[in-house]
C-alpha cells in the first residue's frame, strides 16, 4: 500500500519517498501508535466530585461518541492532514465522511480507492469532488467538523 501513497504524492507534488515518509506517513503511524497505546485510558469512565445537593450519589464522566463527523482535507499534506483527524474520530467511536482536497487529485483518488474498498461505507466513506460536493456535504447536519487550513495556495 505504501508504494501507492508514495506515487500519489510524487504525482501531485514531486516529493521524494523520504520526504513523504518523514512529513506524512511517519506522523500518521505515530498518531495510530499513540491512539492504540492510550485508548483504554481515554475511554475509561472517570470518577469526579459530586456536589452537595446530590449527596450521597457518585458522579462520573463517561466518554461517548458524538456521531457522524466530516473531515475536510487540506491539499498540501493530504494524507497527514486528512487522516490524523480520522484517527481521532475513529478512536472516539464516531463514523466519518472524508472529503479530501481536489487540488491534490492523485492523493484524493488513492485515499478514496483504499478507504472505500476496505471500510464499511456506513462507518467510513471518502467522497471526492470540489466546491459543489463540499458545499453539499456542509448542508447536512453532522455532529463534528474537522478542517485545518495549513497554508494557502
Image: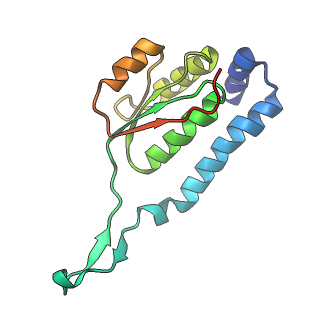
Quadrant of the snapshot with the N terminus:
top right
Residue situated in front as seen by the camera: 145 or 123: 145
Quadrant of the snapshot with the C terminus:
top right
| In the image, residue 78 above or below residue 48 | above
Total labels drawn: 0
Write the residue at 49% across / 59% down. Answer: 39
| In the image, residue 106 above or below residue 81 | above
Q: What colouring style does the render use? A: rainbow
Residue situated in front as seen by the camera: 30 or 13: 13
Residue situated in front as seen by the camera: 59 or 34: 59
| In the image, residue 61 above or below residue 147 | below
* Quarter of the view holding residue 121: top left
Write the residue at 55% across / 16% down. Answer: 102
Judged from this view, the residue extending furthest toward the front is 152
Q: x, y percentage for residue 96?
A: 41, 35
| In the image, residue 93 above or below residue 48 | above
Relative horizontal placement of residue 39, taking residue 46 as reference (left or right): right
Relative horizontal placement of residue 151, taking residue 16 as reference (left or right): left
Q: x, y percentage for residue 72?
A: 48, 29
Write the residue at 41% across / 15% down. Answer: 133
Q: x, y percentage for residue 106?
A: 63, 16
Q: x, y percentage for residue 136?
A: 34, 18
Relative horizontal placement of residue 54, taking residue 38 as reference (left or right): left
Relative horizontal placement of residue 103, taking residue 91 as reference (left or right): right
Amino acid at each position: 500500500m505504501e508504494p501507492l501513497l508514495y506515487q500519489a504524492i510524487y504525482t501531485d507534488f514531486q516529493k521524494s519517498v523520504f520526504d513523504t515518509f518523514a512529513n506524512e506517513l511517519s506522523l500518521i503511524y505515530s498518531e495510530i501508535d499513540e491512539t492504540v497505546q492510550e485508548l483504554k485510558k481515554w475511554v475509561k469512565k472517570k470518577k469526579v466530585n459530586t456536589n452537595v445537593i446530590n449527596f450521597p450519589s457518585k458522579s462520573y464522566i463517561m466518554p461517548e461518541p458524538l456521531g457522524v463527523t466530516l473531515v475536510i482535507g487540506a491539499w498540501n499534506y493530504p494524507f497527514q492532514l486528512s487522516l490524523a483527524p480520522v484517527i481521532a474520530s475513529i478512536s472516539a467511536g464516531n463514523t466519518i465522511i472524508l472529503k479530501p482536497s481536489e487540488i491534490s487529485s492523485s492523493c484524493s483518488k488513492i485515499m478514496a480507492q483504499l478507504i472505500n474498498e476496505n471500510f464499511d461505507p456506513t462507518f467510513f466513506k471518502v467522497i471526492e469532488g470540489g466546491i459543489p460536493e463540499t458545499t453539499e456535504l456542509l448542508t447536512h447536519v453532522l455532529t463534528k467538523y474537522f478542517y485545518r487550513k495549513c497554508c494557502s495556495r
